[in-house]
Image: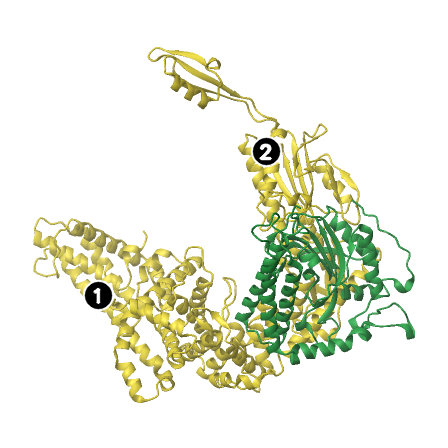
Amino acid sequence: MTNEIPTIEIPAHMHPSRSFQGLILTLHNYWADYGCVILQPYDMEVGAGTFHPATTLRALGPKRWNAAYVQPSRRPKDGRYGENPNRLQHYYQYQVILKPNPPNLQELYLGSLAAIGVDPLLHDIRFVEDDWESPTLGAWGLGWECWCDGMEVSQFTYFQQVCGIECAPVAGELTYGLERLAMYVQGVDNVYDLNFNGREGADKVTYGDVFLQAEQEYSRHNFEYANTAMLLRHFEDAEAECKALLDAGAPASNDNLPMHRMVFPAYDQCIKASHVFNLLDARGVISVTERQSYILRVRNLAKACGEAFLKTQAGGLAA
Amino acid sequence: MPDLLLELRSEEIPARMQRKAAGDLKKVLTDGLVEAGLTYEAAREYWTPRRLTLDIRGLTARSKDISEEIKGPSTTAPEQAVQGFLRKAGLSSIAEAHVHSDPKKGDFYVAHISKPGRAAEEIIAELVPGIIRNFPWPKSMRWGPASAKPGSLRWVRPLQSILCTFGPETEEPMVVDFEIDGIRSGNITYGHRFHAPDAITVRRFDDYVSKLEAAKVVLDADRRKEIILADARNLAFANGLDLVEDDGLLEEVSGLVEWPVVLMGEFEEAFLAIPAEVIRLTIRANQKCFVTRPQGAAEDLSNRFILTANIEAKDGGKEIAHGNGKVVRARLSDALYFWTTDQGDLPDLGELKASAEKFGLDLKKPLDQRMARLDHLGVTFHAKLGTQGERVERIARLAEELAPIVGADPTLARRAAVLAKADLTTEVVGEFPELQGAMGRKYALLQGEHPSVAAAIEEHYKPQGPSDRVASDPVSVAVALADKLDMLVGFWAIDEKPTGSKDPYALRRAALGVVRIILENRITLSLGVAIAAAVSSALATYERLGDGAESRGVVAMLDSRIRDHKGASQLLSEAGLISRLLKGGLAKASSEAFGSADQEREFFDGQRVMELEASLSPFIADLLAFFHDRLKVYLRDQGARHDLIDAVITPQSDDLLQIVRRVEALGSFLDTEDGKNLLAGAKRAANILAAEEKKKTAVAKTVEPAPFREGAEKSLFAAVNQAEKQAGEAIQNEDFSGALLALSVLREPVDSFFEHVLVNDEDQAVRANRLALLARIRAATGQVADFSKIAG
């Protein structure tokens, strides 16, 4: 039952207790050592690491898939002009997706905490019920919020359904809130005080140095200046383009192998529509009743992309 | 006899599901064992976050052998019949059957079936996998490689191991061997996740419990609760504090830990500026911690909280307490932000002017702004019953109308009703809906509202349950009644009444609330009038809003329901109740509702009022009957005799206090000798009469003195005349005891009548006259109570 924690000699300035990037690198090392492919962030604006096609699409179909990556996550509504020490409209999630989930996923997760310096005999680690659902992705799963001394530091989910499609087999998803975790291991109360590069004195770069100005500017943009007429157009365009690409890539009736040829580009448009919707929501131009219908429209795109993905090689289509 | 130990170990089970799941496991397994022919002496279930355990003692080792004979057809029967017999008896050839002889039937086939008993372990091994596959989890999931195939095992979270041992106390127990989706049963379990990660081999329940305990797992949830509660109390006491106990939280926390360790954390005293309830709920909901108060304090909290960890930390829990304190502080910062934001101005005041005008709100005051926003946002109360704003409008109008009846100042009642729902748009109530009302009161006091207005904002929701207190301030009473009556009338109008066990809008509770408010405050109120006033308030709101209004729905419904009843006329309308009401109730509203005096006259004199009057009666009667049912339940719970309640309630009874007084008076009257005898006499009269009426015996229309032959007849007639008149007068004067007293003079003449007079005289005229006299007794007593419904 015990899991061997890979011990990697690291200099002090790269240790997670001192360095935000050290935390990321430690997690990379840990999951790379396990055998995950370490991906880079997806190059589009998303609300959570789950939106990365490496999770949304790859969670579907029968093929094995183990990946880990950092994903910048944009939550336009959570902008606080840099004035709230805990809330950001742009933050990092560390995402691990293992399909099928290994039987010792909880132990693997605890091992990753140990790797970043959280000792389970010093800190109170708990798995507290949390049923996860993403209405826009048509996805749900069961799992927990993982607590460390009362603070939620990760989400742990066994995906049951994604894009409205049953997961077969089930994938396990771990999502670490990196800033929160870093604040915990660095013992810092304000996110902007996090030590980013682990150096001291003149060489030290804080999270605030990197992101405070951006938070202020994006808050202005999200709440006051984003061009809603343009965004509404972009939503329509993205929706139309997603459907058009899915149609264009759909297998022809005389194909020997009914393979879809354009799922990833279509899914990009689904992601775009979702983010545009979040921006419109932050601007307060979407009424309560409209909200539901927008969510449903994105969900329909996600569902269509998921179904198309099953008709590709990565989705398990037998060649 | 052997014992069975079963443990299903999984990843963390949600706390709220554990107790029930363990109970379900016990039930389905013991039921299955009994059905398979086994018996057991005792069974007990246990649970922790990571396991469900069942301890069954004294299980029979084998099920009994069963032998039976199945009679078949005659040996000469056709082949078809023989084949049918073989199928039925489960035989493969007729050679396996026996031949019996009967003097009458001759030779016939008999199958001797003997089913040998089965070993208990075999039964268990067959039973348990099915139970696991079909376990009634509220939500379950698939996992791991097996989930690639359809029909894979589901459990609440991944199931990791099954321990199943069986055997008598004196021997080495065996492992009951079975497998389900790759999980093979065994005799291995694991202790605490962090303190004792190694495998533990188990023989039976006794060593199982003690080995788990050694591996830092307290198996019994009730013991975990005791430990947490005792340690929390002690820790609080040692710090000069009292624990604020919370059973629901204790239950939840006991389901989050296997090895409870109680610790104390703290936050800055500055946060104590936040109302105590908000602090308690913030810490409870988000952190699952207990709060404390200084010893002896009634309401105030201290800045220390108590948490329950799952480990004995190396540093004695310093880091854990420190970490939890940080999170609590962040949460309380949010709460403090909510609390202060709610006391400040809203950003969009300009948009709120129209709403402010509608309700007479002062936009300089924070709570007034919140009410304006509630109206402005058009938040739906119910799709068919319009918005919250419209509902507040109806309640305000109604509260103002009811105020004089309950002794409240109408202006204060209106103000309280207008602000009653304002806190629904506050940040604190958005975060903690259970604080609705309580927060409104606090904010009202802070902006200088009259104390009765502030109290009414909180108390109009009361009583929330049978044990909740009832509002007593007249302003609270007016708003509480208005709030509940509006609900009841609304849902009655759209025909969403409670049925059977379904009462999604808690209308029974609302009606019971009305009953308790009236009775516990001893308020004289005609419920018929109050219901009609609620209807008229709804209609008035509708009239004022005009066609385009969203609440058109509610009143249009009301209107169409009323039309459906058109032509059905009932007692209530005969009493002129509705027109009295519609005119009285609408009088105030009419100046707003109608542009000119002509329009107003047209409305009141027109067909509409007549229609309303005729058709509202059954509507009110139906709702009144619902109140009667609630009243009966309430009075029965209070120990009143239900036969007495039935005797005094009529479909028209709408003064609840009067009903209760009558029940009480009738009860004490029946305790007297006069009462007992009169009851006996009245019942006897009624029974004779009923029997003769059934036989269609002639009963004279009126009693005539001429056919009287006995003195007893004459004196009874005189007494009935007197009693009927006096009792009638007393009832008119609402003097129920007086009416009973008037009836009590009947006792002696009734007794004497039945002693000396034979009702069924041979002379038909005499008999008809005597029966008429009995009818007079029934009528005289009947105007006070229906004696036939009284037991005894």
- What chain does mark 1 sit on? B
Residue B777 numbered mark, or none: none
* Chain of the residue displaying label 2: B
Q: Where is residue B147 drawn, in percent x and y?
A: 65, 45
> Answer yes or no: do the residues labelled 2 and 1 have beta carbons within 8 Å?
no
Looking at the rendered structure, the kind of residue marked 2 is Tyr
Query: Quadrant of the rendered structure where residue A290 is?
Result: bottom right
| Front position in the image: B482 or B287 | B287
**Mark 1 neighbour density, 10 Å: few (under 14) some (14–19) many (20 or more):** many
Image color mode: by chain
Q: Is residue B424 above or below residue A167?
A: below
Which chain is green in the picture?
A
Q: Earlier in the sequence, mark 2 or mark 1?
A: 2
SS at mark 1? helix
In this figure, which residue is indicated by the disc labeled 1? Answer: B724
The part of the image, by quadrant, that contains residue B132 is top right
Q: Label the yellow chain with its letter.
A: B
> Tag 1: residue type?
Glu
* Relative image position of residue B467 (x, y in whole percent): 52, 62
Q: Residue furthest front?
A: A254
Crowding near the residue tagged with mark 2, few <14, some 14–19, many ≥20 C-alpha atoms within 10 Å? some
Between A272 and B720, the one lying in front of the other is A272
- The residue to which callout 2 is attached is B40
Q: Residue at x 67, y 64 (%)?
A: B286
